[in-house]
Image (cartoon, helix red, strand yellow):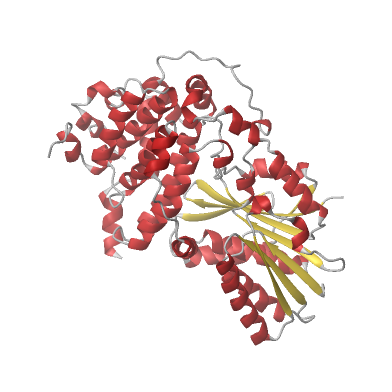
Amino acid sequence: NSLQQGQAQAHMSATALLQKAAQMGSTRSNPAGAAFNNSSSFGSPSTMSSSNNT
Amino acid sequence: LGSPYPWLRELKSEERGLYLIHLLLTCANHVATGSLENANIALEQISQLASPDGDTMQRMAAYFTEALADRILKAWPGLHKALNSTRISLVSEEILVRKLFFEMFPFLKVAFVLTNQAIIEAMEGEKMVHIIDLNAAEPAQWIALIQALSARPEGPPHLRITGINQQKEVLDQLAHRLTEEAEKLDIPFQFNPIVSKLENLDIEKLRVKTGEALAISSVLQLHTLLASDDELLRKKSPLASKNLNGIQLQRALQMNQSTLGELLEKDMVNGYSPSPDSTSSSPLSSSASAKVDSFLNALWGLSPKLMVVTEQDSNHNGSTLMERLLESLYSYAALFDCLESTVSRASLERLKVEKMLFGEEIKNIIACEGAERKERHEKLDKWIQRLDLASFGNVPLSYYGMLQARRLLQGYNCDGYKMKEENGCVVICWQDRPLFSVSAWRCRK
């Protein structure tokens, strides 16, 4: 089922996203976490993926 | 386009997913504290990103955002009723969705295999067997049991199945299928249908006779009896208790073992000061319900030889919105992930299960309070305490039952599904996330 594998590779699972969100939130020094931190930083969501190596 | 946030549409899947989580938590916090204008802003942003036919997080977010909006709307009962005034609940669709859930996931099949095996072992040598199914709908389980009993070395027993369901047509169909199977195998069989809600069940109608060996099967039913009436009085309107919710948020975060709580804590609760003794919530007292206790006592009074209980193994019965939101995000993420890895995104059946089953559960967990909140899923340890208090003693599930269940799971050819044994009970997981528990009980004198 190549379609399903493609589907799975194209994005992280919801579970993995929740874990990642939790990790980012718990690391104060992480700039990605900071971007996650308040709604006024709307302009820079792309920084969120810069430290992503999962 | 007209969107005030055009860049939102350009996010990649992962960024979008993380941002959706952030927005959902922000929104829920505004809902809990009653800042509706801010909640509205978050809802608008979520609507740019969520989608019922998108990737997993987009799909989930669509139902969580709907649930949060529903909770807000309930503060205006007129508005809420008007917007739901033409809502139709089609029995046929509900039956279809239950069936799809049974077919698309292994959970109920595993529960049925374990339940049947426990019944067969407990009923060995019994000549009169009576089974009560607290939510009778799916014939597969009882057809399998009829077949297994007809092949018993000591010969089949006289079998009576009492099925409880709110819908008469479901019971009619079930009666037809089971009677047909019993006739084919020539085993003495009787079906006793009871059209009733579980909470209104008249125990007398179960017609339990002396001399028959009784087994009770409860699949995803007992949690619906946890709603307590005093809670209804306390929280007539979800937004009336906004201050309570705001204060309890801190506690909710401390109680959540995951670090998502820490994210929230920094992210959104800066305005609140912790007040650790604002309310008491001891393990069982917070969810104590006379209804479930008296129901369990009544079942105990029937002296069943065996009772098998399947429940959602989640903690969705927390007293605050934020607690329930965090826990349900994790559980439904696992359920939506199951579907993502086994069913195509374009599947209409998948959409139906997500919307009509999970979406409705999420809405109930998030938007409802008091007697209206039926989806009060609790973890196995709570059920063990509660059943123990009602004088039931645990019966370890047999090695053979678990072997059959494991084989069934392996047959799915999907390594995400896992089964754990916990003190003779079984917990079925997606990856590391426990989702359903199965446990067996007998009357302790």
Q: Quadrant of residue B415?
A: bottom left
B212 relative to B13 in the view: left or right: right
Q: Position of residue B376 (x, y in %)?
A: 57, 42
Q: Position of residue B167 (x, y in %)?
A: 57, 63
Coordinates of residue B22 in the picture (x, y in percent): 33, 31
Residue displayed at 22% across by 32% down: A50
Whether residue B403 is visible: no
How many numbered discs? 0
Picture quarter with the N terminus of chain B: top left
Q: Is residue B12 visible to us here?
A: yes
- Asked where in the image residue B113 lies, by quadrant, the reply is bottom right
Q: Nearer the viewer, residue B109 or B258?
A: B109
- Expressed as whole percent of the image width and height from the top left, the position of residue B81 reads 42, 41
Residue at the far left: name it.
Answer: B1
Q: Which quadrant of the view contains residue B307?
A: bottom right
Instruction: Identify the residue at image location x=50%, y=61%.
Output: B106
Q: Is residue A45 left or right of residue B401?
A: left
**Residue drawn 63% across the image and 76% down it:** B178
Q: Out of B92 and B326, give the one closest to the viewer.
A: B92
